[in-house]
Image (spheres, helix red, strand yellow):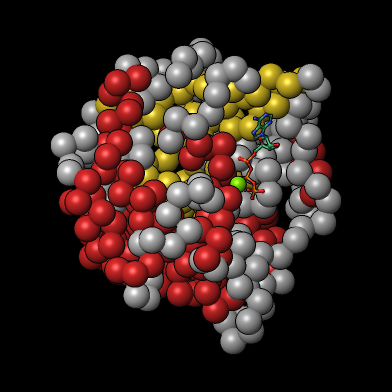
Amino acid sequence: MAVAHLTPSAAGPVSAPDDGALLAVADLRVSFRTPHGVVDAVRGVSFSVGRGETVGILGESGSGKSVSVGAVMGLLDSPPARIGGEIRYRDVDLLRASARETRRIHGDRIAMINQDAVTALNPGLTVGYQIAEMFRVHRPGTSRDDARRKAAELMDRVKIPSARERVQSYPHEFSGGMSQRVMIAMAIALEPDLLIADEPTTALDVTVQAQIMQLLAELRDETGMALILITHDLGVVAESVARVLVMYAGRIVERGPTAEVIARPAHPYTAGLMSSVPRAEHKDRRLATIEGAPPVLTAIPPGCTFHPRCARSRPVCSREGPELGPVVPGRESACHFAEEVYGG
Ligand SMILES: Nc1ncnc2c1ncn2[C@@H]1O[C@H](COP(=O)(O)OP(=O)(O)OP(=O)(O)O)[C@@H](O)[C@H]1O
Ligand SMILES: [Mg+2]
């Protein structure tokens, strides 16, 4: 896939922020040319993921979570997407590497599952065949029998009951939760270093959601793979993610250790997300909705993108866009008044 590059931002030259990281994203920018104008979906996002680390990404609909990981997975067609910045997996620059090189990484070393397992599966092929296909495509030396045996083992590993018989089942014979288990089996088939889970449980009911999260956590602990978990569910983030990034209108507005961010947000947007979240004993743990709407991404206003919705907004907020910067050690926020927010 040919990728058009934007020039590095005015913020300075682009370089990998952390050479020891498994994945290092630096100043990622993604825009889409549409009939209504250019949509600036991701506007200078930098983060890294270490080996075996779990990172959560939170943020309301349209904040650029899926587009960011879509860029990492090489899923964005260009055009309409224009991608700038740097995405480094180990020592490979994924935006500039050859198609041959990225094919060895996407779906193999970095795998992804998303929300819609049911439509992601091919209705005309058995689930066993679809899992076995991972080996046929990425490990061409694997014999048909071996691939089939491994498919059954994987179905067992993701706790699909009677796995050995069910390799012959078709997707329509599976519930949503079981289909998501099949997707997870395909994602972990080649033992990836990094699994990206983009809202893997939103289409499922609450009990099944908990089981899928439990399964992902177990597989992560067994295999030592790193995990990027995108979710709207604050409870999921609180329980399974050590470090969280909060996105708003295509940027990271806050990041830090999850427990600390939840207990004491340093950005008014994060504080808003947390404010009406019921306590742990309540069942509904989804994020609060904040009054007002995010900016239209074809016409982003100057200053802080959150200021029209922010109760703390002052004149500087509509003039100058705050950079993401340290508040206290380990914590970063992109707010002119981060210390004040953090201080309560
Ligand atoms: N192919 C595309 N063409 C034009 N705009 C796009 C395209 N793909 C995504 N966008 C826009 O980019 C923005 C970010 O979308 P993205 O899918 O990353 O949001 P998200 O944070 O994953 O939201 P959700 O929680 O709803 O999944 C949105 O405004 C979306 O409409
Ligand atoms: Mg999304």
The picture places residue 139, in percent across and down from the top left corner, at: 21, 38
Looking at the image, residue 178 lies above or below residue 266: below
Provide residue 89's location: percent of width, then percent of height: 30, 34
Quadrant of res 136? top left
In this view, 327 is above or below 206:
above
Q: In this view, does 27 lie to the left or right of 87?
A: right
Q: Who's the residue at 33% across and 44% down the image?
A: 133
Image-quarter location of ligand 1: top right
From this viewpoint, which residue is outermost toward the right? 292
Q: Nearer the viewer, residue 246 or 298?
A: 298
Depth order, front residue of 243/217:
217
Q: Which residue lies at the image location 59% right of the left edge and 87% below the top edge?
A: 281
| Rendered-image quadrant of the C terminus | bottom right
Q: Name above or below for residue 219 compared with residue 64.
A: below
Residue positioned 31% across, 53% down in the render? 188
Residue 278, visible in the rendered structure: yes
